[in-house]
Amino acid sequence: MPMGRYLREHPTLKYFFFGGKGGVGKTVFAGAAAIGLARQGRRTLLVSTNPVHSLTGLFGYDMLGKHVPVEGVPNLWAFEIDTRESIERSKVEIREKIRWFLKFADITTKADDFVESATMNPAFEESAMFENMIDLMFKNEYDVYVFDTAPTANARRLLGMSSVYSLWVNKMLKSREEARTLREMLSFTKKKETDPLMEYLVSFRDRMEHARKLLTDPTLTSFFFVTLPEALPIAVVTRFIQWFKDFGIPVGGVLVNMVIDSASLGPNAAVFVKNRVAMQQEHMQTIWREFDDSVRAIVPLFDAEVRGVPMLQRLCDAIFAADGAKPAQSAGVGTPHEVAART
Ligand SMILES: Nc1ncnc2c1ncn2[C@@H]1O[C@H](COP(=O)(O)OP(=O)(O)OP(=O)(O)O)[C@@H](O)[C@H]1O
Ligand SMILES: [Mg+2]
C-alpha cells in the first residue's frame, strides 16, 4: 500500500520515526515526510536524535538545541537535539542522586568515581537522547512529530530500553521497599521516612511506562524503514522489523530509496551503470518478496543530493504523490521504472 493511502487510512498517527542502515536516506525522508505532514495543515516538529548534525546540514541553517521555523514551509519547525548539552545536564542530575544515595547509605566513597563509571558508558548517551525524545512527546506542543533517528541499532535499543527500565526499576523499588520496612521496624520512632531515591524511581518508572504506552500504540506511533535495493540495507531492515515486532513497536512500512530509473539509460550507458541497474532489479524482487504489502514508496535516485526545501518537496512528491494498488504479482519482475510506476 503506498504511503499516501497508508497515511489517509491512519489519520491519527502522531509520532513518525524513520530508521534504517547508515546513509540510506533517513534524514531526507524524515524531512520530506515532515513537509508533507505540515502541508496538510498540521503543526509539525521535525526532530533529529542523531548526534551528527543532520538537520542543520539539510536546511543550511543552525537548528542545534532550538525549535526553528523552516523557511518556506508553514506549520513546520525543526529541532536538532543538542546531545552534549543534554548529556551534561544528565550528568549533573545523576551526580546529585548518587551523592544523596551514598550519604543515605553511609558510604564514604566520593560520588565522582561512580558518576564517571556511570556516564562513560555509551548507553548513557543513548539514554540521555531517549529522555530528550520522550520529554518532547510528553510536552505535546505539536500535532505531529517526525523523528530522524540515529542508525537503527540505536533506535531499537532506545525503544527497547523503556521495557528494560521498567523491569529494573520495579526490582529496585521492591528491594527499597523491603529495606524501608525493615528500617522502620528496627527504629524506635514510628515516623515514616521519606525516601527521595524511591520517589525518583517511582516517577522514572511512570515516565517509562507512559513512553512505552505511546511508543507501542499503533494509533499514534509508526516506524518507517528506509532501504536501498541492496543486500545489506535490506538485511538490516528485515532484522529490525522482527525486533520491533518483538517489542510491540508498530512498523509503518518500508520505503525504497535511490532506485535508478532504467528508462533514463540510453543504449550507450556505461557497463557499470547497466550492471548496477540489473543488481537493483534483483534486489527489488527480494524487497517485494520480503516486504510485499508493506512497501510504501519507491523513490528514484535524483541527479543531485537532497538539500533544502525545493529538493525535499520533490522527494516529498515522490513519496506521497504516487498512489494505486499493490502490484498484481508482488514478487514479479519489472524494471525499476515499471516498479516505480506501479506504486
Ligand atoms: N533519492 C536520492 N537521490 C539522490 N540523493 C539522495 C537521495 N536520497 C538521499 N540522498 C543523499 O544521500 C545522502 C544520505 O542521505 P541521508 O543523510 O538522508 O541518509 P541517512 O540515512 O540520514 O544517513 P546517516 O545514517 O548518516 O544519518 C545525502 O547526501 C542525501 O542528500
Ligand atoms: Mg541522518
Image (cartoon, grey):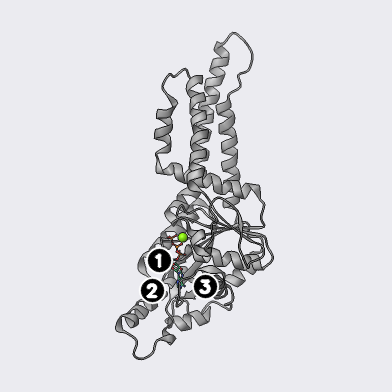
Q: Which residue is mark 3?
A: 297
Residue 308, given in percent of the width and then of the height, sits at 53, 68
Which kind of residue does numbered mark 2 sit on?
His
Mark 1 vs mark 3, CA separation in Å: 15 Å
Q: Nearer the viewer, residue 254 or 313?
A: 313
Can you see residue 167? no
Judged from this view, the residue extending furthest toward the left is 271
Residue 180, given in percent of the width and then of the height, sits at 55, 20
Q: Quadrant of the N terminus?
A: bottom right
* Residue at 51% in and 38% down: 90
* Residue at 60% in and 67% down: 35
Residue 224, given in percent of the width and then of the height, sits at 52, 62
Q: Quadrant of residue 125?
A: top left
Question: Element at badge 3?
Answer: strand
| Left/right of residue 283 with respect to residue 30 in the rendered view | left
Circles 3, 2 touching at the beta carbon (< 8 Å)? no
- Residue 303 higher or lower than 219, as above or below: below
| Left/right of residue 277 with respect to residue 49 in the rendered view | left
Crowdedness near tag 1: few (<14), some (14–19) or many (≥20) residues, C-alpha within 10 Å = many
Circles 1, 2 touching at the beta carbon (< 8 Å)? yes
Instruction: Ligand 1: give its quadrant.
Output: bottom left
Residue 82, given in percent of the width and then of the height, sits at 51, 49
Which kind of residue does numbered mark 1 sit on?
Ile
Q: Which mark is residue 283?
A: 2
- Residue 142 higher or lower than 104, as above or below: below
Q: Which residue is mark 1?
A: 234
Crowdedness near tag 2: few (<14), some (14–19) or many (≥20) residues, C-alpha within 10 Å = some
**Label 3 or label 2, whichever comes before in sequence order:** 2
Question: Element at badge 2?
Answer: helix
